[in-house]
Amino acid sequence: MSELNNIVLKILSNGKGILAADESTGTMTKRLSAVKVESTPENRLLFRETLFSSESMKTCIGGVILYDETIKQKTSLEKTIPELISSSGAVPGIKVDTGAKSLADSPDEKITEGLDGLRERLKDYYKLGARFTKWRGIYIISKNYPSKLSIDANANALAKYSSIVQENGMVPIVEPEVLMDGDHTAEDCLNKTSEVIKKCFEELIKHKVSLEGIILKPNMILPGNKSNKKISNEEVAKLTLKCLKDSVPKEVPGIAFLSGGQTEMEATENLNLINTFNDTNFIMSYSYGRALQQSAITFWSKDIKNIKDTQKIFNHRAKMCSLASQGKWSKELEAN
């Protein structure tokens, strides 16, 4: 399994993190519509190619999660998208789950699907250049949720997926996301996230998944977005570290946080504080979508042919995240 561990370290070492560019066509259409750009295959490719050919791909981005449409596309220079990503030294990855559906016997909750035909799809993705994969389980917090059924079912699916992915020579990203939607407190988030992550590792171990060859992609510990009990960034960092130290086995090499609805600045500042306080051996990095792309897509939408200046915006954001993953970020650097 050392080869899988090497892939993890290539993706997350030296202040590098993951660009999550695996938005489904539906999600990407919403993002583009929000900035008044028509969502065509050509426009989706143009924006992504703009990011993937930027300078920060060499210094700040160790891996890119792609969507099925994108991994099969060719760039304007007739390279495949995985070839473009690999040429910068980053590792191409692929989202392999097929989405979250209502959970039987608990229809307010979700179970992630995609195990059917997974082996065959992985073989194809490997040939296309993918060396890591992503599967996301989602959990809601309320008085009765997440239920034991939801926690158990999603952990089982994440473990089965991880086992099949490693069998095919790729690194699985294990993403159990406890959503920030709701009025719950940070303490509720801490308790439920800890329970969710512990169950995931119980199942991963049961399925004989090599923990040295995975990346954990958790949420940070935050109060719900409708909660009136807000906490400081320092508290977010300390509670997040407490959760992970209590829940994650030491064999796991790297943790790449999801941004989960945080603004670019919040996701950067919280990551920086986590690394300032980090007294573990875990690499603590980022696997951000909107928190890496939002400023870039807003700027790009004003003139989609202005590649160079869009890349400048993206390079800055990626550099800030990279510094945060090393505990070297400060607000003053945002002005430069």
Image (cartoon, rainbow, N blue to C red):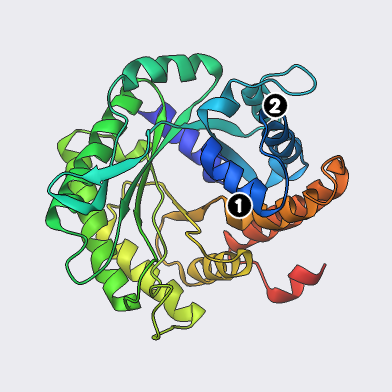
Residue 47's image quarter? top right
The crowd level at tag 1 (other Cα within 10 Å; few <14, some 14-19, many 20+) is many
**Is tag 1's residue or tag 2's residue first in the polypeptide sequence?**
1
Residue at 40% x, 20% y: name it. Answer: 122
Residue that numbered label 2 is attached to = 84
Relative height, residue 225 to residue 89 (above, below) = below
Position of residue 248 in the picture relative to residue 280 (left or right)? left
Residue at 43% x, 27% y: name it. Answer: 3
Q: Quadrant of the N terminus?
A: top left
Residue 150, horizontal then vertical, whole percent: 19, 51
Q: Is residue 182 in sight in this rendering?
A: yes
Residue 56, horizontal then vertical, whole percent: 73, 45
Q: Which of 153 and 254 is in front in this view?
A: 153
The crowd level at tag 2 (other Cα within 10 Å; few <14, some 14-19, many 20+) is some
Residue 225, horizontal then vertical, whole percent: 43, 73
Relative height, residue 46 to residue 177 (above, below) = above
Residue that numbered label 1 is attached to = 15
Disc 2, SS: helix
Residue 192, horizontal then vertical, whole percent: 24, 65
Q: Which amino acid does label 1 sit on?
A: Gly
Q: Which amino acid does label 2 sit on?
A: Leu
Residue at 56% x, 26% y: name it. Answer: 69
